Image: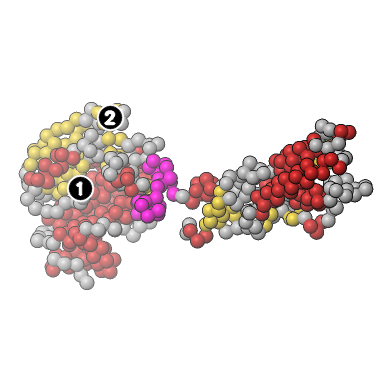
Amino acid sequence: MSSSSVNHISQPCIYGHFVSSTTERKSRLMKWLSKLFKGGGSGNRGQQPQFLGDENMVWRAPARSMDDNSRTNKEKEELDRAIALSLAEDLRRPKGYRWRTDQDEDLARSLQDNSNSSSHPPKYAPSYAPWEYNPNSYRKCSGCNKDIISGNYLGCMETFFHPECFLCRACGVPITEYEFSLSGNNTYHKSCFKEMTHPKCEVCHQFIPTNGAGLIEYRCHPFWSQKYCPAHENDNTKRCCSCERLESRNARYMSLGDGRSLCLECMESAIMDTGDCQPLYHSIRDYYEGMNMKIDQQVPMLLVERHALNEAIEGEKHGLHHMPETRGLCLSEEQTVTSILRRPKFGGRGLIGIRTHPQKLIRRCEVTAILVIYGLPRLLTGAILAHELMHAWLRLKGYRNLTPEVEEGICQVLSHMWLESEVVPGSRNMPSTSTASSSSTWSSSKKGGKSQAESKLGEFFMHQIAHDASPAYGGGFRAAYAAVNKYGLRSTLDHIHLTGNFPL
């Protein structure tokens, strides 16, 4: 909320514990009166004022002798000074912020008049009398809309309130603090207003601090809208390797043992070994067949650890890889690769009992194998497989010497199309054959359909592809996607085969 619409007002309302209340003022005046009356005639020596309730006060005026005139004049001057100081204390406050009662003014006026005429007191009338009832002279409370007849009241924003009617719009509790916040015509406790408007970090759950310029500065994930303090980007807070969300203080991420961490949502559908991944791999091959892009060769697929994938990349002679970290590889060279043979178990906050197996990959065609890093959710694993299978299809179909923007761009389009067929009901990218259609939904139908959280993950992975900032993967995808939307997938592939570029 902009600063122009919110005011933080200091000293908007002054309650009894900040300035003299009615009782305190009476007490102050009565000390002077007591001192004055103690010096009266012998018949009245020691007589004290009498109090009747909180609102009314009467006393008997002492008889004066001629011998007491000099003392009386001095005490009269002191009394006048006390009354003037009491009134000046209130008058110094700005209009609308004075904490007073109508009785205070009437009492002071009555005392002043009585003091000035003490040498000639009236024959009847008491020295203090109740004021007359005059409805037109009462102020109206803006909270309850009733007259403020007696007692304390609050002046604020050129209106008046009973103290119990000056309420916080958020919590409904009377505002008694020294300061409060004002938004429009609504009043708030400063703490309530901060709770409503000041953003909280979704990692540490504290109010996001202001920077050196006094501005609230925070980071926000472009898809998940997760707001967090900038400091969490450099304080070793864990980030999910799948969905990119930071670990909250009230949640715990699972460590995969290779520097990666996985949030609980992504862990629910994570694929952990090669055997678990085989049905998904074959369903994506069926998806290609449904798109009239059948891959005839039996290309091996292995789920591998992070370091094994990095070693395979170093042994590969050509080709770009995923950024900022490679998560899949279409292998063309003969290598020995260590794959995940048995699904590890969860122990504490990490994985235990992982079992690997070295496997010699022999090159029988243009593609030796497809490797995917283990521990990713089903939809992300599938998107990587769809991307790498497109690399395999291009090589097996004789597409040679393509630029990184063209090859990676068209591979990202197939990955995006597969995700869309999984996430968006009735998508135009559903495969055309019944075999491919039934196979492509193997995993979700096996467990009774995708959860809302998994579907949201699929939308995020599509968002990642569409908004990738790299020239090859991001720029290449957007150029390929525009060509496919305009000319169709088959015509775009034919044009790439002939020219090595996308049709314009």
Residue at x-position 40% and y-position 47%: 208
- Residue 64 shows in this picture: no
**Residue 210, magenta (yes or no):** yes
Residue that label 2 marks: 345
Question: In the rendered structure, which amino acid carries the disc numbered 2?
Answer: Lys
Regarding mark 1 in the picture, which secondary structure is present there?
Answer: loop
The spot of residue 201 in percent (x, y) is: 40, 45
Query: Depth-wise, is mark 2 or mark 1 nearer the camera?
Result: 1
Q: Which residue is mark 1?
A: 325
Left or right, 426 with reference to 13: left
Residue 74: name its quadrant.
top right
Left or right: 93 in relation to 58: left
The part of the chain drawn in magenta is 199-222
Residue occupying the point 12% across, 53% down: 319
- Name the magenta segment's main secondary structure: loop
Q: Residue at x 16, y 48 (%)?
A: 329
Picture coordinates of residue 288 (x, y %)?
23, 54
Left or right of residue 151, residue 413 in this image = left
Inspect the image, locate mark 1, and give the three-letter code of the amino acid beneath it: Glu
Residue 431: say if magenta: no
Q: Is residue 490 left or right of residue 186?
A: left
User: Which residue ends up furthest to the right in the rendered image?
Assistant: 123
Label 2 Cα neighbours within 10 Å, binned few <14 / some 14-19 / many ≥20: few
Q: Which mark is residue 195?
A: none
Residues tagged 2 and 1 counted as in contact (Cβ below 8 A): no
From the top left corner, tell me how far across and down residue 358 is, in percent.
12, 34
